[in-house]
Image: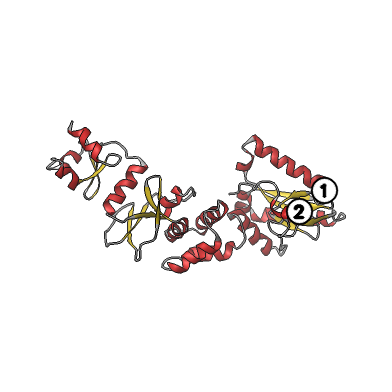
């Protein structure tokens, strides 16, 4: 009966030692010894079983340890916003000077940021979560992937992330550099493509523009468009082809390119990263081939034209 009562008073099986003592458990730590039925999660925090804790139990224990007013930020908050953040740490903002340890990061914030309830947990805005997650990253690629995902999924905008980084400048050098370099690129792969095109001096000002034929029919929205010769460069992830419908979309897109007389070069993101010199040779060769035949009668759709946003669905890129 006591165990059932304790579980009812706990949060997902997580409870403070103070609460346990008030419920009649004079020495809860004895039950947390090796082989015991419970386990110690943090100083003053107990899990009422000795098996592996779930992620929600880990987060609950972290917030209980942090105290009243604590909110989730960083990688864990990003994941709860639906963003693919790396890192196993639990980063919590607190209004006091509490200290964390191990995978629990307790950081004092003044003023405390606003938060919303996400799945029963207090979580900061996606902008603050992304910026705080990037503060703990050392890889520019990892930071770029997270920032690009946040923008692509509509959780953030470049402007809102930049404003958050300006508000909380401590440790934000990496995310500010990523925002500056990413510019209008929509993925890590596109950033790599822009770098490569600049390096080989085969640059184009046209990225992610919509192309239409002479009758105004939408053909596609290539990652890079070399308008002088009518060459489309598509950075296609393997993941994009896993589903039958995605494969059909890719075939339909390539058929539209072919019917319009457009040459298209398809590149995997992994090859951009691992064998950029080979990709550079292929891009140069494709550009020469496109220049050797008459340019097709196609045009760029102006950004303010309704058809500019009516092109096929975006690809998945890595």
Q: Is residue 267 above or below residue 162?
A: above
Residue 115 found in image quarter: bottom left
> Quarter of the image containing the N terminus?
top left
Residue 191: x, y in percent?
A: 61, 58
Does the rendering let one see residue 29?
no
Label 2 crowd bin: few (<14), some (14–19), many (20+), radius 10 Å: many
- The answer to whether residue 200 is seen in the rendering is yes
The answer to whether residue 120 is left or right of residue 202 is left
Do the residues bearing badges 1 and 2 touch, measured as CB atoms within 8 Å? yes
Question: What colour scheme has been applied to the protein in the rendered image?
Answer: secondary structure
The answer to which quarter of the image holds residue 168 is bottom left
The label on residue 260 is 1
Q: Specify the label residue 211 is tagged with.
A: 2
- Describe residue 78's horizontal placement relative to residue 3 as left or right: right
Q: Is residue 38 above or below residue 199?
A: above
**Count of marks overlaid on the render:** 2
Residue 245 in the figure: left or right of residue 252: left
Q: Residue at x 30, y 40 (%)?
A: 12
* Up-down relation of residue 72 to residue 163 (above or below): above
Dot 1 falls on a residue whose secondary structure is loop
Q: In the rendered structure, which disc, 1 or 2, sits on the residue that comes first in sequence?
A: 2
Residue at point 35% right, 62% down? 112
Per the rendering, the mark at residue 82 is none
* Position in image of residue 4 (x %, y %): 22, 33
Residue 134 image point, x, y percent = 46, 59
Q: Which of pointers 1 and 2 indicates the residue nearer the eye? A: 2
Q: Residue at x 33, y 60 (%)?
A: 107
Query: Is residue 169 shown left or right of residue 58?
Result: right
Callout 2: SS: strand
Q: Please provide percent x and percent y for residue 176.
A: 51, 66
Count residues near mark 1 (Cα–Cα under 10 Å), then give few for <14, some for 14-19, many for 20+: some
């Amino acid at each position: 009966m006591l165990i059932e009562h304790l579980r009812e008073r706990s949060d997902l099986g997580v409870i403070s030692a103070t609460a346990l003592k008030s419920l009649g458990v004079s020495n809860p730590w004895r039950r947390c010894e090796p082989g015991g039925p419970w386990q110690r999660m943090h100083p003053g925090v107990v899990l009422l079983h000795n098996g592996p804790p779930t992620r929600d139990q880990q987060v609950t224990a972290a917030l209980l340890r942090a105290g009243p007013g604590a909110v989730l930020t960083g990688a864990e908050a990003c994941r709860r916003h639906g963003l693919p953040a790396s890192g196993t740490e639990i980063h919590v903002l607190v209004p006091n000077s509490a200290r964390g340890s191990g995978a629990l990061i307790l950081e004092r914030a003044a003023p405390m940021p606003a938060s919303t309830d996400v799945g029963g947990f207090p979580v900061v805005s996606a902008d603050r979560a992304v910026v705080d997650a990037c503060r703990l990253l050392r890889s520019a690629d990892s930071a770029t992937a997270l920032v690009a995902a946040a923008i692509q999924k509509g959780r953030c905008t470049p402007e809102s992330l930049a404003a958050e980084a300006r508000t909380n400048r401590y440790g934000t050098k990496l995310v500010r550099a990523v925002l500056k370099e990413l510019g209008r690129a929509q993925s890590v792969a596109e950033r790599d493509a822009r770098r490569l095109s600049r390096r080989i001096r085969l640059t184009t000002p046209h990225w992610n523009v919509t192309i239409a034929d002479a009758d105004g029919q939408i053909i596609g929205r290539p990652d890079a468009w070399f308008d002088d010769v009518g060459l489309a460069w598509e950075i296609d992830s393997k993941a994009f082809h896993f589903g039958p419908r995605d494969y059909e979309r890719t075939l339909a897109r390539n058929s539209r390119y072919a019917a319009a007389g457009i040459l298209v070069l398809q590149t995997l993101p992994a090859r951009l990263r691992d064998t950029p010199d080979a990709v550079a040779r292929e891009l140069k060769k494709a550009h020469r081939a496109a220049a050797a035949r008459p340019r097709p009668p196609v045009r760029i759709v102006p950004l303010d034209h309704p058809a500019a946003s009516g092109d096929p669905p975006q690809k998945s890129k890595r």
